[in-house]
Image: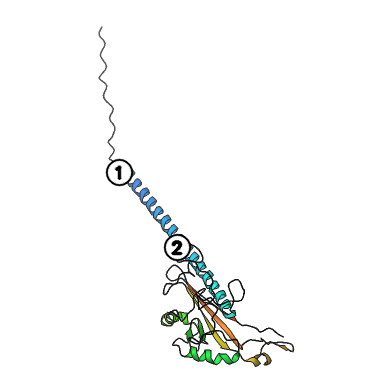
Amino acid sequence: MYEQAPPPTQPLSFPRVRQRGISLFVVIVIVLLSTLLSLWAARTSLFNELIVGNDADYQRAFEAAQALMQDAELDIRRAKPDGSACAPVVAKPNICREPDAATLVWYPEEDQDLATLFATLDLQATKCLNGMCLKRTGNQDFWSDTTTLNAMIANNVGARYGQFTGAEIGLVGSKASHSILKNTTAGQGGWYWVEVMPYDANAGNTGLITNGSNNLALNLKPNVAFRITAIARGLRPGTQVVLQSTFVRQKLKN
């Protein structure tokens, strides 16, 4: 008896699936998104760095402007940076603004000396000389006009930090002192101007400022008030700080 052999086994067949490259497309999208995120992060970091840098430069210029105003007050009082009385220095004839027949520009102690000072300043095109000025009659914000400002920061018009007080500014290439104050390059650094404004000695009797029956008497010597304008330019282009204050010297009562 013979047994019939089973039929040969047929290999299994599966339907062919067409490849469409969907994985490659997903990878490309992920790479593009990662690139965009990286660019956004880099741009945000750069923007934040610019903000921090600009703010630091403004603060640096603001500090320089404050120092210039203090230096101007010392100049008016003829005092050293430590507050002591200023003494002339032979090697630095500008220090202490001694009365000089050549320039006739110093802070007078008596009212009768004001006429000579005002006449000298009036001869100047800017009405200023070595940081001393007549009271401005035009636009008060001269720093807003480029042409006027360029004339005001020219040599022998505005005063530099320490020029008339002897305050130390450090060497240009050193890290000592303030980087803006020691920068005396044309158009850079900082300057101050002091407007010498006549004051009416009878103003204290007009009742404009009063507290009951007591009027404000300033007891000025001489009868002038000083308006100080200080401008400091930062280390970055476009950074500029302007500060103003009013200063008076009161005479001691006997």
Q: Position of residue 96 (x, y in %)?
A: 55, 78
Foreground pick, 217 / 15: 217
Residue type at the position of mark 2: Leu
Q: Which corner quadrant holds the N terminus?
A: top left
* Between 201 and 159, the one nearer to me in the picture: 159
Give the colouring mode of the picture: rainbow
User: Looking at the image, is mark 1 or mark 2 earlier in the sequence?
Assistant: 1
Q: Secondary structure at mark 2?
A: helix
Q: Quadrant of the C terminus?
A: bottom right
What is the x, y in percent for residue 168? 52, 69
Few, some or many C-alpha atoms within 10 Å of disc 2 (few <14, some 14-19, many ≥20)? few
Q: Which residue is mark 2?
A: 50
Q: Position of residue 112 (x, y in %)?
A: 58, 92
Q: Is residue 198 above or below residue 37?
A: below
Farthest top residue in view: 1
Q: Quadrant of residue 207?
A: bottom right
Q: In the rendered structure, find residue 177 and report the number of the disc placed on it.
A: none
- From what the image shows, is residue 234 above or below residue 8? below
Determine whether 101 is above or below 166 in the image.
Answer: below
Q: CA distance from mark 1 to mark 2?
A: 44 Å
Circle on res. 21 = 1
SS at mark 1? Answer: loop
Residue appearing at x 32%, y 44% in the figure? 24
Q: Please give the name of the residue rendered at 64% of the width and 91% of the height, measured from the top-left corner.
A: 201
Q: Nearer the viewer, mark 1 or mark 2?
A: 2
Question: Residue at image x 57%, y 74%?
Answer: 70
Q: Is residue 155 shown above or below 118?
A: above
